[in-house]
Amino acid sequence: MKPGRRSLTLAQQYVNLRGNPVSAGSGNLRRGHLTWRHEASPSPLSRVYGVRIEVDQQLSPDVFVETPDLSVLAGGRKLPHVYQQRPPRLCLFLPGTSEFRPWMRIDQTIMPWTVLWLFYFEEWLGSDEWKGGGVHPGESEDRRRGRREAVPDGDPYSRGALA
């Protein structure tokens, strides 16, 4: 952690989520665990997705799409860029790389990254090619290294924000 940066408490994350129109939704905070639900749509022409975020203090958030069923939308294809297929847990950043830190606001990082993931997911539905960049779970180290080197410097989302 950077000097002077303190981890946000889950109560602070909750207040930030409630106060930001980007993350409009509802949630609860109990026993060191935050759950937040909201609806997201990556474009005006896109469907609306029901998203759930789960986070424990000092841990990275887990993001799930609850509705609609992504597997049904995928028509039997294996979902791209997820840590697990059932329930789909989105791969938004590469763990262990400090792309998400406990002092970062979920409403300013995880929320926009989720919407961007949904945008690329909808594009993938039509093209069958993941164009969101990043490192895919389970890739070999050589492929990871090559992909990371090919990332343009100017795009903050392509630096592993979407792993």
Image: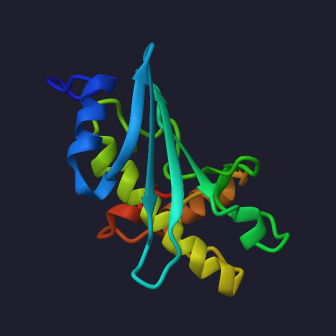
Considering only vertical position in the picture, is 63 above or below 121? above
Left or right relative to 106: residue 86: right
Left or right relative to 5: residue 23: right
**Residue placed at 38% from the left, 53% from the top?**
111
| Position of the C terminus by quadrant | bottom right
Q: Name the residue nearer the viewer: 103 or 3.
A: 103
Work out which residue is located at the far top of the displayed protein and give it: 31
- Give percent across and percent down for residue 82: 66, 54
Q: Name the residue nearer the viewer: 97 or 50.
A: 50
Work out which residue is located at the far right of the displayed protein and give it: 76
**Residue placed at 28% from the left, 38% from the top?**
104
Considering only vertical position in the picture, is 85 above or below 29? below
- Give percent across and percent down for residue 147: 56, 65
**Residue placed at 37% from the left, 49% from the top?**
25
**Residue placed at 76% from the left, 48% from the top?**
86
Q: Quadrant of residue 116?
A: bottom left
- Give percent across and percent down for residue 152: 38, 71
Does residue 79 show up?
A: no
Work out which residue is located at the far front of the displayed protein and give it: 26
Considering only vertical position in the picture, is 147 above or below 7? below
> How many discs appear?
0
| Position of the N terminus by quadrant | top left
Does residue 84 show up?
A: yes
